[in-house]
Image (tube, coloured by chain):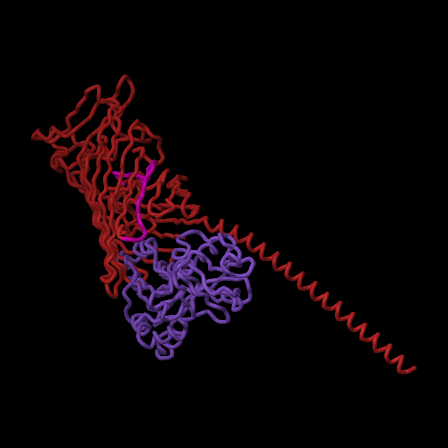
Chain colours: A purple, B red
């Protein structure tokens, strides 16, 4: 009996230790997906023995994948919640490792010919909670505001909800789109549209200046303003791993935080952490 | 003449061309209006579908099934590894747990119903409503059937728990884990208070599937902390728990240990006023969980709990006194011809240590040791001694469990686990039902379990 048990244990252990090779899987934030792909492409060109597979899906999806053990690295445009860390603790007995990989100003998009140049945080909150529905109420033309946002699996959605809406729910009229690129695309074609997302995606649209309150100065989401903290809706972009990274994963993360990796951050349109 | 005809023709041609252009522009305009109408229609449909989808997204369905094969060291043994083996049965297949949970999560309010479907039938595990305050989202009120807020192991889900079963200590003190009652929970998400949490509630003090049987309510509470040390890859969680309640006697006979006697034995208090009186059921406990990310190998945890207190039980069982429990085999006395169950008061303690080491992504090694001393006022030699009336409910047990878990994927895991169960050996002069306990019973159990969770 004892021999059978011992043999079974050894067999199961050996099966579990089978290695897949040097492949690193990265999943999560759609905001970070372009950045993550650029990192992966350049890193793989310099390390042909390592494969980095990048997919999006949203920060929530990435965090779930990290908890389920189906990704090595999770990209997230928000920090992990306490409840998510608890789940990681239950399954892997770790707290996870948080790496601040870049900084982002959460930009407010409107079409290029929209006469509105700036909004305060409370005006944004009123627009997204449905209290303000006409551009005239915020200094624009007398037309309905068409509001675009992200799906609730998105870290950008959660960050916007927590930091701009103060935890209140989005209005039902907010049209949710699957990815920042889709929001940019919708706003660029809609003269009455407004959307939010990473500054790096802002091509062919206008970025509004944002002020903390009605009496503050409005700031554009530039590197200088994001770094100084003057731009009121800026955030870190995170990478999470289950355990302290070792081997190829450690090399990859160290490279991302190196001068070369952080230069990609700037090229893509975000702001380096170092 | 030719010139006139040419001019007239030209004018007619220009007129016809202009008319044609006009009608073409009108047609295009009509088409644009039509397309715009169609797009508006689609938008309306999408918005309608979105509100339906948003409502559906609030319904969360989850569940798990634990199918297992067990082999006991001998047939018909009593066991805390999934219940007693029937007479002559040494091995068995079981659906140990078949859970199906529906959660309607409306952000600040929650509806939860969890069923347990096994070969024994269908039972309700959870049925509660929970409301969170909207300002800080740190406090919530829960009412219904749910886990008793005591210690760590009760609320640690059976689908996540590495050892197949909870410790003998918890199975004895808190059978079924759940209770009927209401509790308040404080668990701030942010700020310095986020390191602390508090759960406290008032309960019937019986079982989750039984109606209240007396006029008293029991209090259960736990004050906890969670200290993360991210840089070191370390976390320390813990808490202090209290259970303070009573059971109501339906007998006048209350047995307590006579500590003054040279032979430890129960003495009975048969005062008639004991009938209908409440008798203390008090537990206190500490729990501590350490988590550490072992470089290269994976996360490890060491968890432990120590509980002590006073338990009103029966002669054969140190589980809490519940005269209404179905199928009880406790010795009855009689009042006015009606059978009643006598109370045996015991001072108890117990503890466990559980070590889990993750090895890579898919494997976990588990070791667990638990000890339950149902009556700390007596020794093994007192039980069965001449002149003693101690019984099986006073025998101390320890269990060493070793196991291996293999996670096939994010849904499926296999568990191989062996329980070495030791009972203390009672006095060599013991006879009757105590006689088998003069030796260690052959009640070790091997469990091979397959779990699917979604």
**Magenta stretch holds residue B189:** yes
Q: How many numbered discs, if any?
A: 0
Relative to B176, is A17 above or below?
below
Residue segment shown in magenta: B171-191
Q: Nearer the viewer, residue A272 or B100?
A: A272
Question: Could you tell me residue B200's position as x and y percent?
Answer: 28, 40
- The answer to whether residue B299 is left or right of residue A20 is left
Q: Nearer the viewer, residue A51 or A15?
A: A51
Instruction: Kindly give the residue lying farthest to the bottom in the view shown.
Output: B2
Q: Nearer the viewer, residue A25 or B244?
A: B244
Question: Could you tell me residue B306's position as x and y percent?
Answer: 19, 44
Question: Could you tell me residue A129's position as x and y percent?
Answer: 47, 53
Question: Could you tell me residue B149's position as x and y percent?
Answer: 29, 42
**Magenta stretch holds residue B238:** no
Residue A71 in sight in this render = no
Relative to A74, is B211 above or below?
above
**In the picture, residue B332 is in which quadrant?**
top left
Instruction: Kindly give the residue lying farthest to the left in the view shown.
Output: B262
Q: Nearer the viewer, residue A25 or B203?
A: B203
Quadrant including the N terminus of chain A? bottom left
Residue A92 in sight in this render = yes
- The answer to whether residue B337 is left or right of residue A231 is left
Instruction: Kindly give the residue lying farthest to the right in the view shown.
Output: B1
Q: Which residue is depicted at the point 55% across and 66% down?
A: A189
Quadrant including the C terminus of chain A? bottom left
**In the picture, residue A50 is in which quadrant?**
bottom left
């Amino acid at each position: 009996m004892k021999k059978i048990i011992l043999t079974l244990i050894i067999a199961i252990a050996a099966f579990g230790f089978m290695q897949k090779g040097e492949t690193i899987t990265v999943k999560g934030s759609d905001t970070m997906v372009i950045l993550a792909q650029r990192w992966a492409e350049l890193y793989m060109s310099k390390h042909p023995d390592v494969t980095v597979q990048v997919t999006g899906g949203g920060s929530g999806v990435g965090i779930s994948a990290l908890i389920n053990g189906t990704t090595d690295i999770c990209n997230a445009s928000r920090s992990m919640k306490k409840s998510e860390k608890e789940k990681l603790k239950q399954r892997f007995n770790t707290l996870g490792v948080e790496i601040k990989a870049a900084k982002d100003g959460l930009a407010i998009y409107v079409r290029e010919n929209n006469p509105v140049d700036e909004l305060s945080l409370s005006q944004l909150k009123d627009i997204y909670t449905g209290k303000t529905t006409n551009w005239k109420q915020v200094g624009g033309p007398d037309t309905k505001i068409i509001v675009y946002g992200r799906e609730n699996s998105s870290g950008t959605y959660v960050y916007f909800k927590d930091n701009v809406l103060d935890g209140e729910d989005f209005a039902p009229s907010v049209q949710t789109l699957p990815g920042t690129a889709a929001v940019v695309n919708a706003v660029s074609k809609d003269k009455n549209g407004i959307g939010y997302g990473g500054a790096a995606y802002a091509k062919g649209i206008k970025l509004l200046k944002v002020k903390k309150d009605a009496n503050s100065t409005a700031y554009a989401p530039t590197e200088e303003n994001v770094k100084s903290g003057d731009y009121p809706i800026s955030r870190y972009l995170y990478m999470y791993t289950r355990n302290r990274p070792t081997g190829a994963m450690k090399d990859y993360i160290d490279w991302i935080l190196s001068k070369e990796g952080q230069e990609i951050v700037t090229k893509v349109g975000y702001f380096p952490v170092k | 003449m030719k010139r006139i005809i040419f001019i007239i023709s030209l004018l007619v041609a220009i007129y016809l061309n202009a008319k044609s252009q006009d009608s073409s522009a009108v047609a295009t305009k009509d088409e644009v209006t039509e397309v715009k109408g169609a797009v508006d229609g689609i938008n309306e449909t999408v918005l309608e579908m979105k509100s339906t989808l948003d409502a559906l997204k609030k319904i969360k369905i989850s569940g798990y099934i634990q199918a297992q094969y067990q082999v006991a060291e001998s047939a018909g043994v009593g066991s805390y590894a999934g219940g007693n083996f029937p007479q002559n049965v040494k091995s068995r297949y079981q659906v140990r747990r078949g859970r199906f949970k529906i959660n309607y999560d409306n952000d600040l309010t929650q509806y939860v119903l969890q069923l347990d479907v096994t070969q024994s039938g269908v039972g309700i595990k959870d049925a509660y409503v929970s409301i969170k305050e909207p300002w800080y989202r740190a406090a919530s009120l829960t009412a219904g059937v749910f886990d008793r807020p005591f210690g760590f192991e009760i609320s640690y889900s059976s689908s996540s728990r590495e050892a197949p079963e909870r410790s003998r200590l918890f199975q004895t003190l808190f059978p079924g884990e759940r209770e009927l009652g209401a509790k308040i929970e404080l668990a701030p998400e942010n700020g310095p208070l986020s390191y602390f949490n508090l759960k406290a509630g008032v309960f019937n003090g019986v079982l989750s599937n039984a109606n209240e049987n007396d006029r008293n309510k029991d209090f259960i509470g736990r004050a906890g902390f969670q200290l993360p040390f991210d840089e070191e890859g370390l976390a320390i969680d813990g808490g202090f728990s209290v259970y303070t309640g009573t059971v109501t006697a339906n007998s006048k006979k209350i047995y307590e240990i006579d500590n003054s006697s040279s032979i430890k034995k129960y003495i009975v208090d048969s005062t008639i006023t004991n009938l209908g009186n409440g008798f203390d059921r008090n537990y206190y406990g500490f729990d501590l969980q350490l988590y550490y990310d072992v470089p290269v190998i994976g996360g490890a945890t060491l968890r432990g709990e120590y509980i002590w207190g006073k338990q009103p039980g029966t002669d054969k069982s140190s589980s809490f006194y519940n005269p209404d429990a179905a199928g009880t085999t406790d010795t009855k006395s009689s009042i006015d011809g009606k059978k009643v169950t006598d109370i045996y008061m015991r001072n108890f303690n117990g503890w466990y240590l559980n070590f889990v080491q993750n090895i890579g992504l898919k494997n976990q090694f588990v070791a667990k040791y638990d000890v339950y001393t149902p009556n700390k006022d007596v020794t093994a030699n007192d039980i069965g001694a001449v002149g003693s009336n101690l019984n099986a409910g006073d025998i101390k047990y320890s269990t060493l469990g070793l196991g291996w878990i293999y996670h096939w994927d994010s849904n499926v895991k296999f568990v191989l686990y062996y329980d070495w169960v030791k009972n203390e050996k009672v006095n060599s002069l013991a006879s009757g039902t105590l006689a088998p306990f003069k030796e260690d019973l052959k009640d070790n159990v091997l469990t091979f379990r397959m779990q699917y969770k979604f």
